[in-house]
Image: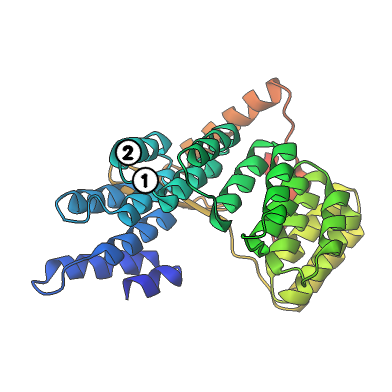
Amino acid sequence: MITGYVQEGENEEALKIFSRMLSTNGAKPNQGTFVSVLGGCSNLAGLGEGQQVHQIISKSVYQDGTFVISALINMYSKCGELKTARKMFDDGMTSQRDLVSWNGIIAAYAHHGCGKEAIRLFKEMRKSGFKPDNVTYVGLISACSHAGLVEEGLKYFDEIVKDGSILVGEDHYACLVDLCGRAGRLKEAVDFIERLETKPSACVWGALLAGCNVHANAGIGKLAAKKLLEVEPENAGTYMLLSNINASTGKWKEASRVRLKMKDKGLKKQPGCSWIEVGNRVHVFVVGDKSHSQSKLIYSLIRDLHSKMKKVGYELNNDFLFDEDEDEDFSSI
């Protein structure tokens, strides 16, 4: 049940089931339970809950299990505690490091955009006698992508292709497209996709579209959106990205046409949502939300922050800030 809820994105329900499990005198959590529930904590960025689970693990026979420690590394990383994740890797696994734990710490640094440290760990892993697998390279290329290390990422992708023992999959293709897309090398990304012997998946086209959004390339963006909608015709996010790309290049009529088509299909993009835990209380925020009891103070601080950003030369880009119901200028906040 816990694993099922986590896989379906119902992470809070998974934690509730785990809590009920602990309150009974029957079933006891095992390694699989802890790995699943830590995954739920990771998805929620629930540091407090993750730490509580960690305390329970420390009193069990599973505290030295490699899968459990790898899940803890992932949880602390996803909750923003990279130093704690590294400490878990350094102190908790010195004599028990396996490929899973190495992959976990490399992915942790990738998640935080620390490409050079991820590469250093990759080299250290090889020196320790471990052979990288397909998961290792996904984390490594992703780390290069987030850190702007394009040539390094291309080199590691070339390694996989030449290594006949590793099956190159959609995740690797998507990482490579993302690597080129973030760097503005969109034509290279398209050329790569066209050379693929298999039909590109939604994640590959999505990575290309995201790169077009960043670099305002309406031509390639339109191609990526068309291909993505063939795979996922009901994806409202695709319409929004294409509309934003057109707007950023001054194609306002085209942007409006895309958004009108989206509305005609009855599609509505879920509003962005974030949350933060302060003083044992979780504060949830939705785009444009002013229901928080301290919303006036919060928006006042945002205005002050924007003012400081402008002073150092950063200009807000309102072209990318469309709302489905109204076109509100962000500067009106």
Per the image, label 2 sits on a secondary structure element best described as loop
Residues at circles 2 and 1 in contact by the CB criterion of under 8 Å: yes
Residue 242 located left or right of residue 147: right
> The N terminus appears in which quarter of the rendering?
bottom left
Residue 203: x, y in percent? 68, 63
Residue 94 disc label: 2
Gap between marks 2 and 1 measured at Cα: 6 Å
Q: Residue at x 19, y 49 (%)?
A: 58
Residue 153: x, y in percent? 69, 43
Per the image, label 1 sits on a secondary structure element best described as loop
Residue 267 located left or right of residue 55: right
Residue 263 located left or right of residue 120: right
Dot 1 amino acid type: Arg
Which residue has dot 1 on it? Answer: 97
**Is residue 154 something that shows in the picture?**
yes
Residue 236: x, y in percent? 69, 68
Q: Residue at x 36, y 56 (%)?
A: 41
**Is residue 333 something that shows in the picture?**
no
Q: Residue at x 38, y 65 (%)?
A: 11
Residue 140 located left or right of residue 79: right
Front residue (pair 99, 81): 99
The relative height of residue 206 versus residue 26 in the rendered view (above or below) is above
